[in-house]
Amino acid sequence: MPTLSLRTPDDYALARDCCSYGYFLLAPNRWSVREQTLTRPLRLRDASVVVEIAQPKGAGTPLRVRTSRTLAKDEKAEARAQIGRMLRLDEDAGVIDAFHARDPRWKASGRGRLFRSPTLFEDVIKTVTSCNVTWPGTVQMNLRLCEVLGEKEAEARGFPDAAKMARTRPQTLRARCRVGYRDQRLVEMAKRFRASPARGGLDVEWLEDPRTSDEDVRTTLLDLPGIGPYAAANIMQLMGRYAHVPCDTETVRHAKLVLGYKGTSAAVTRRVRTHYAPFGDHAFRSYWFELWDYYESKHGPAHTWERDSTGKLFTAALLNKA
DNA sequence: GGTAGACCTGGACGC
DNA sequence: GCGTCCAGGTCTACC
């Protein structure tokens, strides 16, 4: 099987840094608990490829990426870029040290990186499918989006790209992918990603540019169909902008159960914002690793979670019972 | 600017 | 096995 090697930051640990955010459990990602590898198809410029990512020599050593077919030189570069985005290989040890200086609670475990998707489009769609639905519903929607619309490569189906989703009828998304009222919003979203900025499309390059201000990014995201305050803040953390905490029912549950806050959801949400404000540009990471720590205290280390079983446990009702 | 109600699916629960 | 209720964030209409 063809193999690539990817250099990692000195402190990079695949099992810890990959299994750090819920999206690693969503299709087409497949984390193998037994092998401690991540497998998924990537959509390259002209065709797809399935990659299996491992770190056989342990933390800080290069990643071994097996590919389902031999890649051309430009395809290798594209695959490296997508894997780098997904695993946050761009956040070197210095970036993580800066977070630990602000919040030393995570220094011993080395936590700091959060898993995301190979593309912004996939992150945005995954966020829309996580709104107003319980976690098992999100798992199902992503599975069906891949099964119904995903391109087949080596017996696996990838995540649909914007072009494919933009061409899909809303009725198909609703009937076959069970996305409900999100059908038109998803198609419209895909069209915004497809169209050029001159034709009212999203300027993805500008949006992903670190020089673009948080406020401009937030305003642009809120203008997208299906994106409200929670989704915008979540997409921003996926883009590496950690100053805002996306507040949802999980946040309120966490604040009441772990932080001991009382009162209405609105009142608790206001206190949450104040609570994490001292962490500044790292507020989301501080919040998230508290939440993740709680999940792991209930279900064991995330690198031991099976998508089809553990995933179903993440509902507010069950966590409240726990 | 704040709030109520609709949107849709799937799981839990009672009968 | 069926019907009912509920959780979940966004959007629109209305005050």
Image (cartoon, coloured by chain):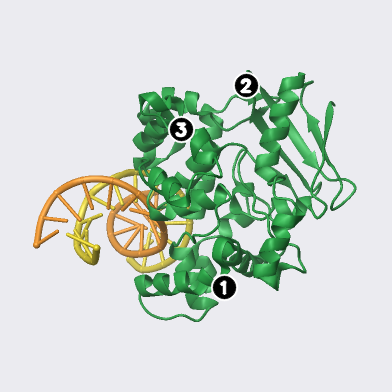
Chain colours: A green, B yellow, C orange
In this view, A203 is above or below A254: above
- A264 relative position to A302: left or right: left
Badges 3 and 1, same chain: yes
Quadrant hosting residue A262: bottom left
C-alpha distance separating marks 3 and 1: 44 Å
Badges 2 and 3, same chain: yes
Q: Amino acid at mark 3?
A: Asp
Q: Amino acid at mark 1?
A: Ala
Quadrant hosting residue A83: top right
The x, y position of residue A64, in whole percent, is 83, 38
Q: Amino acid at mark 2?
A: Arg
- A189 relative position to A288: left or right: left
Location of the N terminus of chain A (image quadrant): top right
Mark closer to the chain start, 3 or 1: 3
**Which is closer to the viewer, label 2 or label 1?**
2
Q: Which residue is mark 3?
A: A203
Question: Subunit of mark 2?
Answer: A
Q: Which residue is mark 2?
A: A45
The x, y position of residue A85, in whole percent, is 65, 41
Quadrant hosting residue A180: top left
Secondary structure beneath dot 1 equals loop
Mark closer to the chain start, 2 or 3: 2
Badges 2 and 1, same chain: yes
Question: Subunit of mark 1?
Answer: A
Secondary structure beneath dot 3 equals loop
Q: Which mark is residue A322?
A: 1
